[in-house]
Amino acid sequence: MMRAVVAIEWLKLRRSRVVLTATAVLVFLLPGSAAAFMAAYLSGGDSQFAAKVSTLLNGRSWADYLGLIGQLSSVGALLSVGIVVCWTYGREFSDGTIGNLFALPISRARIAWAKGLVVLCWGVATSILGVLVAVLLGLALSLDATSAAEIAQAATMPIVVATLTTLLAVPLALVASAGRGYLPGVAALLAVVVVTQIVTTLGASPWFPWAAPALWSGLGGPALSAQVTSVQLAMPCLVGALGMSLCAWWWKHCEVV
Amino acid sequence: MPETASVAEPAVLEVRGVRRSYRDLVAVAGVDLYLARGEIHALVGLNGAGKTTLMRLMLGMARPESGLVRLNGRDISRCRAADWARVGHLIETPFAYPELTVTENVIASARLHGLQTLMAATAAEESISDLGLTPWASRPARGLSLGNRQRLGLACALAHRPDVLVLDEPTNGLDPRGVIIVRESLRKAAERGAAVLVSSHHLDEVSRVAHRITVMHGSVLVGSLDPGGLDLERRFFDMVYAAEEPLAGPVPKPGRRL
């Protein structure tokens, strides 16, 4: 039964225009933006844009370029994945289809887990695809590299950041479900982004799970990035697991009102 | 008016003394009802009578404050997957995900009810044909008219050939042809042994198809009507008015014809 539910949720995800837009942002817009910034950095010059880009990039290496994608992903992926999470769960309530998920041989808790699994797989797959697109664009920019291994090593960071960010979006599933629609989830997403920005600005403790991947990617500078520990980076996994468990519990006990 | 299943015909789905309120609004106040195999049972009542809430209670969509709901003799909180696999329902919103085609929606519903991929595809094709949706089979549900969305919801409820069918106003939004198609689908389901509960405002319609008609008013069951009798509408309003009088509520007394 679980396979059937996963297949159905995957089909719904594939057909969604919301998901299509989010995929385009993660696979093309973020790498494209990073490549455009790097191109401006490489061309030098004294334009205002080039000056601003020089504050984001410290060099012309693959690590600098893919690190920038990690930084962009820490916000861009949270917004994109967060909206997909809110839609995936909240649409059942907004569209009124939740009633059709009752009186079935499979529990609603397992349906909720299936949705989470599908979104997680989609998030990881799009982040990998996005980095692949970024690598292709980087090759076109003729960035400095000594070996393919160096590129692969640099590519690990944005993939990890996007994956951790995907996990950090999972608790929004609970908000969208308990709020009985995707809009409460989107409101919570915006609140998370704002609070994360404030926390980062005020000294940015990497113990705040939503700030940890961004700080590790270098958004707070190289010094802060070096201070982020593996335990702090593991916190998003805990947030994701806890958010998913609570959401599944809520789905198990919810009623149609 | 309490109802109990006879020993000869055990109830497939049964509620006993169920009560449910929402804050100060009592939606269902101590209702007993049973569905028997091969029988179409119509639940009729005015808007706000409690029909939809009662159906939700029967399907586990809402939990009763008191009373029991049993499916195949088991409390629904302890029902097995096999019990639920044989239930079909359409309560308010049809199973119609707009981004999926008509066929994909019916297959998805059939698979959620435990059918394997190939069986689900065959069942979906048959159900789509039965409900007259073949011309729209490969179109996304978002483009369907209200009536065709309702028919899609019915196709999803019927595709896995359930033994228990609970339908809340299934002819909503349907044209006369659609109403006849639904009527025939319900008859077919009952003929193969399904227990069918259907709520409706259309007394003429339920009189054509129902074996039993139960009237709900003011959150309780107030009586039953003979589907074959004359002037069903007048008898319905007489029953509703008689139930309303002690409450001194604002139900207008109709003439012989409305």
Image (tube, coloured by chain):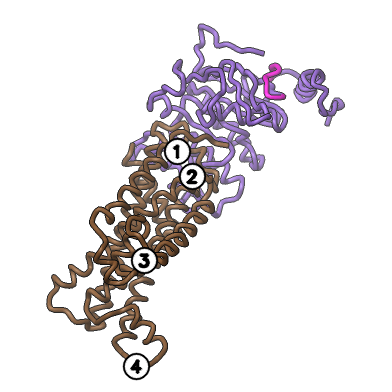
Chain colours: A brown, B purple
Which of the pair B104/A239 is nearer the observer? A239
Amino acid type, residue under disc 4 in the picture: Gly
**For the residues bearing labels 1 and 3, Cβ distance under 8 angstroms:** no
Amino acid type, residue under disc 3 in the picture: Leu
Q: Which image quarter holds the C terminus of chain A? A: top right
Which of the pair A72/A35 is nearer the observer? A72
Closer to us: mark 2 or mark 3? 2
Q: Where is residue B229? Give x, y as percent.
A: 73, 18
Amino acid type, residue under disc 1 in the picture: Trp
- Residue ID for mark 4: A45
Identify the secondary structure beneath mark 2.
helix
Direction from residue B220 to residue B238 in the image, left or right: right
Tell me the tag on residue A251. 1
Q: Where is residue B95? Give x, y as percent.
A: 51, 42
Q: Residues within 10 Å of mark 1 (few under 14, many from 20)?
A: many
**For the residues bearing labels 1 and 2, Cβ distance under 8 angstroms:** yes
Up the image or down, B231 lies above or below A134; here it is above
Tell me the tag on residue A53. none
Q: Where is residue A41? Give x, y as percent.
A: 31, 85
Q: CA distance from mark 3 to mark 4?
A: 29 Å
Up the image or down, A172 lies above or below A156; here it is above
| Magenta: main secondary structure | strand
Q: For mark 3, name the chain.
A: A
For the view shown, which residue lies furthest in the bottom direction?
A: A45
Magenta segment boundaries in residue numbering: B218-227
Up the image or down, B240 lies above or below B202; here it is above
- Residue ID for mark 2: A177
